[in-house]
Image (tube, helix red, strand yellow):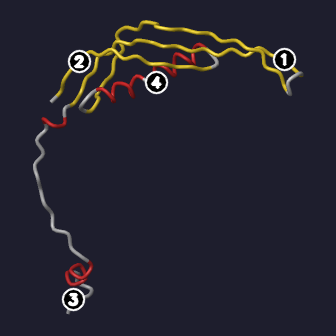
Amino acid sequence: MKREMEKTVTVKGSAETKEKALAVAMSHIKKEVEKETQGMLFRIEPLDMDVIHAKEVSYKERFLGILFPRIRTHYELTLQVKVRLNLIELDKISFHKETKEEFGVAQFIGKTKLFSK
C-alpha cells in the first residue's frame, strides 16, 4: 500500500531575483514528479541538488526609449534534484462496495407523515 522510492528530476525557474528563481524551480518539483509516477504522493523529500545551468541576464531599460535609464537583471536556473518519494498505491487498497437506494420526489412525498393519509 505504501511505497518509497528515489527519483531524479530536472526543473527550471526564472525570475528577477536569485531567491525567486530558486523558489520557482523548486515549486516545479511536484509537477514533474506527478507526471512520471503512478499513485498518490504522500511526501516529497529533496535529498540532493545539482545546478545544471545558472544564467544572469542584465539589460538597460529606458522609459519611452530615451528617459530614465535603469539596469534590469533576470536570473535563470536549471536544477537536477534527487528526491525521496513516499507513495500510496490506491490500487492495493480494497474498497468494500455498498449500494444505497435513492428515493425520487414521488417516493419521498409518500414516505413523509405530512402527506400520508
Residue drawn at 18 percent across, 27 percent down: 2
Residue drawn at 44 percent across, 18 percent down: 11
| Tag 2–tag 1 contact (CB < 8 Å) | no
Front: mark 2 or 3: 2
Label disc, if present, on residue 25 of the rendered structure: none
| Tag 1–tag 3 contact (CB < 8 Å) | no
Measured in 3D between alpha carbons, the distance from the residue under mark 2 to the one under mark 4, in whole angstroms, is 20 Å
Q: Position of residue 51 (x, y in %)?
A: 46, 7
Looking at the picture, which amino acid does disc 4 mark?
Answer: Ser
- State the SS at label 4: helix
- State the SS at label 2: strand
Label 4 crowding class (10 Å Cα cut-off): few <14, some 14-19, many 20+? Answer: some
Residue drawn at 24 percent across, 76 percent down: 104
Q: From the image, which quarter does the C terminus lie in?
A: bottom left
From the viewer's perspective, tell me whether residue 101 is left or right of residue 37.
left
Q: Which residue is mark 2?
A: 5
Q: Which residue is mark 4?
A: 27
Up-down: is 53 above or below 110? above
The answer to which of marks 1 and 3 sits earlier in the sequence is 1
- State the SS at label 3: loop
Measured in 3D between alpha carbons, the distance from the residue under mark 2 to the one under mark 3, in whole angstroms, is 62 Å
The answer to which of marks 1 and 4 sits earlier in the sequence is 4
Looking at the picture, which amino acid does disc 3 mark?
Answer: Ser
Q: Which residue is mark 1?
A: 69
The answer to which of marks 2 and 3 sits earlier in the sequence is 2
